[in-house]
Amino acid sequence: MNRLQIQKKNILTAIVAVAILGVAAMQLARAAEAKAKYTIKEVMKATNKGDASIGKRVAQGMGTAEDFAKLVEYYSALPRCTPEKGDKASWEAKSAALLKAAQGLKPGDAASLAAYKKAANCKACHSAHKPD
């Protein structure tokens, strides 16, 4: 091999290495973005624990715009979480429906409240996804 061929080979090797590192960096960045902000347990505790919880206030028609925003923040984490039990597709469908219902909540809107109550059916989700 002559000197020119060696230089071309080294340049090509460097380009391939940079490309591989770039792809790896992008995948790591996406994985970090995809990680849920809250765990399932944290979401359930924050939204449903106790008689004064955000979820109870909203379900009783006493939710505020701030409550709706908090629900959206917490429920946004759920589709990114993996349940301990059950089918991942079922989890994604149920959690996406809950998030969509929370995003649609409007003060004084009976239809959006009914959609939220339907999506927030604890038993349907717990039966399929909560460990015994």
Image (tube, rainbow, N blue to C red):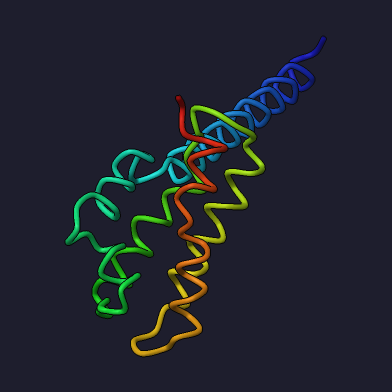
When the figure is inspected, residue 79 is found, relative to residue 22, above or below; the finding is below
Which of the two residues, 111 or 82, is positioned nearer the viewer here?
A: 111
Residue at the extreme top:
1
In which quadrant will I find the C terminus?
top left
Q: Residue at x 55, y 57 (%)?
A: 96
Residue 118 placement, left or right of 75: right
Residue at the extreme bottom:
108
Instruction: Report x, y in % for residue 78.
Output: 45, 48
Q: Residue at x 39, y 84 (%)?
A: 106
Which of the two residues, 95 or 23, is positioned nearer the viewer here?
A: 95
Which of the two residues, 13 or 24, is positioned nearer the viewer here?
A: 24
Residue 53 placement, left or right of 12: left
Residue 73 placement, left or right of 15: left
In which quadrant will I find the N terminus?
top right
Residue 83 placement, left or right of 1: left
When the figure is inspected, residue 105 is found, relative to residue 33, above or below; the finding is below
Instruction: Report x, y in % for residue 130.
Output: 46, 33
Instruction: Report x, y in % for residue 58.
Output: 31, 71
Q: Residue at x 62, y 52 (%)?
A: 93
When the figure is inspected, residue 24 is found, relative to residue 77, above or below; the finding is above
Q: In which image quadrant can residue 117 be found?
A: bottom left
Total marks shown come to 0
Q: Residue at x 58, y 43 (%)?
A: 91
